[in-house]
Image (cartoon, rainbow, N blue to C red):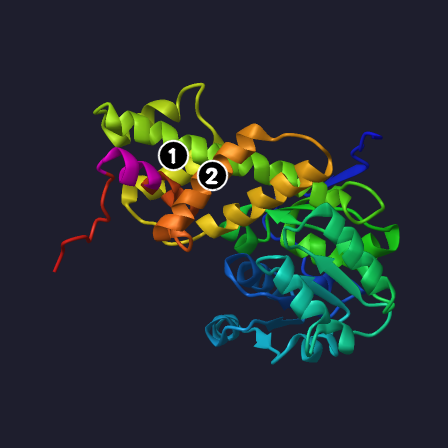
Amino acid sequence: MRALHLAHVATRPREPRRPTVSDSTTTPRVGVIGLGAMGLGTATALHERGLPVVGCDIAESACRAFERVGGRCAGSPDELAAECDVVLTIVVNAEQVERVLFGERGLVDRFKPGGLLIQCATVAPSLAKRLAERLAAHGIEMLDAPISGGAAKARSGKLSVMASGRETAFAKAGPVLDAMAASVYRLGDAPGVGSSMKLVNQLLAGVHIAAAAEAMALGIRMGLDPQTVFDVITHSAGNSWMFENRVPHILAGDYTPLSAVDIFVKDLNIVHETGRELAMTTPIAASALQQFTAAKGAGFGREDDAAVIKVYQRLGGIALPEAANDGGV
């Protein structure tokens, strides 16, 4: 297989005031389908940068949340598409992507030829290629552009975007990417490459979260103070970004989902299936997948992904820190 080479990396230094779209001669009308934690943050960041933004989500509460920050919502993907030049899909899985693009009242029904779809959901690279082909039949261009960084970076417009597609797609997407991302990695001219890179990221992220949970569980089981474990490891060679980011959720006993267990069950399954397509084993990712699957099976699927540590609580009898208000009046 021919190696993939990094074609171009566009990074933007942080400035006291980021330029808004009103500073430019081109102001695309943007739609964001999917107003969950990442989608709402991205839509809000785009709105604050001066882009005209329309949101869409099946949950009425998500639409109301966007409206409270000054945004506007459409009732369906096709209604949104009818008034937009560029549309982002920031939904949970491949099934949702399929539905919002090609299902009843889907985007393709009314998105004008020449429009651009920026597909941000994590999907299999093979699916990203098929989506681009199907959209092309409707005269719609696609940028395969998975995102990373979490809800906080989405809200501040500092995401990382792993993108591939034709030069014309990058040109159309420019003002939108400028407003939502701190780093845009241009990985090639064909859809599928961006999704391939995102799978590498998700393999590492899932493994690191599962490893962080196991390490904390071991420390607790040996009688170490959880806060002390965190303090020592974050200043030692065993630290990782995920350990430093997720273990505070465990210490606070707060599993409010920022990224849920279910997300890594899905993403690590995509890693597994892609490995099968390539006849390549991924044993470490498979082990992490089993832990997340066990957490889902135990009823923690919709909790924060740090809740994977609760598998060890169930099996090993460890006592996890409780939320500060547990048992309060």
Residue at position x 58%, y 40% in the image: 202
Task: Specify the segment rendered in magenta.
Answer: 311-319
Q: Amino acid at mark 1?
A: Ala
* Occupied quadrant, residue 247: top left
Residue 313 position (above or below residue 134): above
Residue type, mark 2 in image = Gln
Instruction: Give the vertical position of 106 relative to 266 (above or below).
Output: below
Mark 1–mark 2 distance (CA, rounded to whole Å): 13 Å
Task: Locate residue 84, reporting x and y percent.
Answer: 74, 73
**Tag 1 and tag 2, C-beta contact below 8 Å:** no
- Residue 301 or residue 139, whichever sits in front: 301
Going by the image, does 255 lie left or right of 164?
left
Mark nearer the N terminus (1 vs 2): 1
* Count of residue discs: 2
**Of 33 and 297, which appears nearest the observer?**
297
Q: Nearer the viewer, residue 184 or 280?
A: 280
Give the label on residue 213, or none: 1
Does 177 lie within the magenta span? no
Asked whether the viewer can see residue 137, the reply is yes
Residue 121, quarter of picture: bottom right
Q: What residue did someone put label 2 on?
A: 290
Position of the N terminus, as image quadrant, is top right
Q: Magenta stretch mostly in which secondary structure?
A: helix
Q: Which residue is drawn at the image coordinates 63% and 62% (left, top)? A: 95
At x 59% / y 53%, what residue is drawn? 157
State the SS at label 2: helix
Nearest the camera: 84 or 107? Answer: 107
